[in-house]
Image: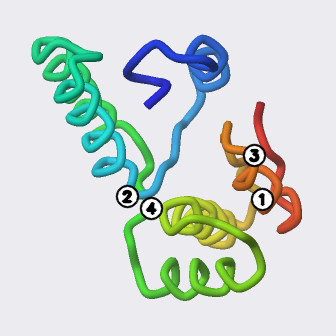
């Protein structure tokens, strides 16, 4: 969400990912769309701003490295849920990062602003930004 609407951490996020390859879970496409739709329903965003942000999201997904929701990701997410007090979406995001790291054979840092997700990622040995 921080990439598409102004909120605490938005500027920091944009700085972190500027000029860098960005990877994300396929789940992010739905999570962000859900957040934008909710904000528009609550009138925190105009419909025009929602639609501009959704168009940006779709354009970004054409450029992002997208980790699909595969059996390897869901298996890892289930295991993470047993080790950490994560919500479903956060477990999938962290599992996606771990699966991508394994596939690339490099440690991919996780960009996260949620304290529980940050703690779980650190406990799993992943670098966490910011």
> Horizontally, is 65 left or right of 110 in the view?
left
Measure how far apart labels 4 and 3 are at the Cα level.
22 Å
On the image, the x and y values in percent for residue 89 come to 48, 61
- Earlier residue among tags 3 and 1: 3
- Give the crowd class for mark 2: few <14, some 14-19, many >=20 residues within 10 Å: some
- Give the crowd class for mark 3: few <14, some 14-19, many >=20 residues within 10 Å: few
Name the mark nearer the viewer: 3 or 1. 3
Q: Quadrant of residue 16?
A: top right
| Tag 2–tag 4 contact (CB < 8 Å) | no
Measure how far apart labels 3 and 2 are at the Cα level.
19 Å
Label placed on residue 115: 3
Measure how far apart labels 2 and 4 are at the Cα level.
9 Å
Q: Residue at x 18, y 17 (%)?
A: 52
Helix, strand or loop at mark 1: helix
- Give the crowd class for mark 4: few <14, some 14-19, many >=20 residues within 10 Å: some
Q: Residue at x 55, y 36 (%)?
A: 21
The residue that mark 4 highlights is: 67
> Horizontally, is 57 left or right of 114 in the view?
left
Q: Residue at x 13, y 22 (%)?
A: 51
Label placed on residue 27: 2
The residue that mark 1 highlights is: 121
Helix, strand or loop at mark 2: helix
| Tag 4–tag 3 contact (CB < 8 Å) | no
- In the image, residue 4 sits, relative to residue 46, either above or below, namely below
Name the mark nearer the viewer: 2 or 4. 2
On the image, the x and y values in percent for residue 94 come to 63, 62
- Earlier residue among tags 1 and 4: 4
> Horizontally, is 30 left or right of 69 in the view?
left
């Amino acid at each position: 969400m921080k990439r598409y609407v102004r909120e605490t951490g938005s500027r920091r996020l944009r700085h972190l990912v500027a000029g860098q390859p960005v990877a994300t879970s396929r789940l992010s496409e739905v999570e962000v769309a859900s957040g934008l739709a909710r904000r528009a329903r609550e009138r925190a965003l105009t419909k025009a701003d929602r639609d501009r942000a959704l168009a940006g999201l779709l354009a970004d997904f054409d450029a992002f490295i997208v980790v699909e929701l595969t059996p390897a990701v869901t298996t890892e997410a289930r295991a993470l849920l047993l080790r950490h007090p994560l919500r479903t979406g956060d477990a999938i995001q962290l599992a996606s990062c771990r699966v991508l790291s394994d596939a690339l054979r490099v440690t991919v840092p996780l960009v996260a602003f949620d304290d529980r997700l940050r703690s779980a990622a650190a406990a799993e040995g992943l670098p966490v930004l910011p």
